[in-house]
Amino acid sequence: MNLQKLVRSNIYSLKPYSCARDEFKGEASVYLDANENPMNAPYNRYPDPLQWKLKEKIAKIKHVRPEQIMLGNGSDEPIDLVFRIFCEPKEDNIVAIEPTYGMYKVCADINNVEYLKAFLNEDFTLDANRVLAAVNEKTKIIFLCSPNNPTGNLLNRAEMLKIVENFGGIVVIDEAYIDFSSEKSWLEELSNHPNIIVLQTFSKAWGLASVRCGMAFASEEIISYFNKVKYPYNINLLTQNFVSEQLDYEDRKNEWVSMLLEQRTNLEKELKKLPFVEKIYPTDANFLLVKVPNANGIYQYLVNKGVIVRNRNTVSLCQGGLRVTVGTLKENQTLMFELQKFKENFV
Ligand SMILES: *Cc1c(COP(=O)(O)O)cnc(C)c1O
């Protein structure tokens, strides 16, 4: 893969902002280089722009090198940055599966980059040939999300591989829900496929959505472009320290995942008993896509009861779809209690 040909020429030749902490690395006793206030330690100091301490911890857990990691303000930041690194506005395009996570389209629109859709099959399985057929000579990126949002299913690995191996551009694999999934991550394929970027996040299984910390994993060369383009101090010290601390509790994260998967099984079983539930799609994530005849009506009914689910009725191939996040036992019981009352009115 020739990365120089894929990266926008202005980014390729960009001389990034050089901050005080880039120029001097190491320990010193007196820091008079960054116009910081000497009082109010440790928050008076600019944080490490490349978050090495945190990355070293993540690297150990994920079995990658720290240089293969970019940390962002949620995964939303690396999603935006891939457009800015690879796509010339009004000229290049990207291909994404349809339906999928909405941020890819929003970032394409913001960056004035054409967004081409490659539909999944009716059952939300991936057809690699359809994705590859949507590609043209101006396609720089293909977005694959597995497990996919809002459908919940894993994409078939062999189909994904076909795309990764036959596309000459970048393949972004969004693994926001990978911790809930039975499939292994694409992380271990990083060294075999220099054109993939794997996205993961602390927002879901780790229970840290409010902290805004997402991860992009790729070749060191691709990560070096992320580092050029991102804001120098994109991850603040509070976040770096807090996420670092939370990483010590991986066991707790795994326990949450087991609990939620158990809850998901129960919820699925209960939902299936409702006469108006037409279908529950297979899921490998912490949510269920449920097909009902009157999604808008049920959605509004639940809103009035103070229970909010995600109405996906207008999303391609998801007509009648409500996306339900798996909550605590009590939250799921409240949902079921209200739906059972709705059932009484329904029959
Ligand atoms: C929730 C989600 C994310 C996470 O976004 P953050 O910005 O990290 O909170 C990324 N991709 C998909 C598909 C998601 O559903």
Image: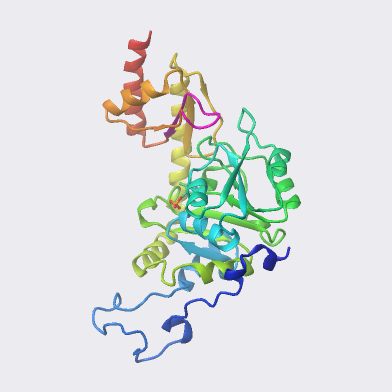
| Residue ID at (30%, 77%) | 42
Considering the image in quadrants, where does the N terminus appear?
bottom right
Q: Magenta includes 316?
A: yes
Start-end of magenta stretch: 314-324
Q: Residue at x 44, y 39 (%)?
A: 260
For this rendering, which residue is in front, 208 or 260?
A: 208
Q: Position of residue 2 (x, y in %)?
A: 72, 65
Q: Residue shown at 69%/46% (left/top)?
A: 135
Say above or below: 59 vs 328.
Answer: below
* Residue 141 left/right relative to 246: right
Question: What predominant SS class does the magenta segment belong to?
Answer: loop
Say if 17 sits above or below 100 in the image.
Answer: below
Kindly indicate the quadrant of the structure image that contains residue 43.
Answer: bottom left
Say if residue 185 shows up in the picture.
no
- Residue name at image x 50 percent, y 25 percent: 319
Image vertical order of residue 36 relative to residue 210, above or below: below
Q: Is residue 286 visible?
A: yes
Q: Is residue 67 above or below residue 299?
A: below
Outermost residue, left side: 39
Q: Position of residue 4 (x, y in %)?
A: 68, 68
Figure quadrant of residue 216 = bottom right
In the rendered image, residue 7 lying in the magenta stretch gets the answer no
Looking at this rendering, what residue extends furthest in the top direction?
347
Looking at the image, residue 179 sits to the left or right of residue 308; the answer is right
Q: How is the image coloured?
A: rainbow
* x, y percent for residue 277: 46, 19
Query: On the rendered structure, is 323 left or right of 338?
Result: right
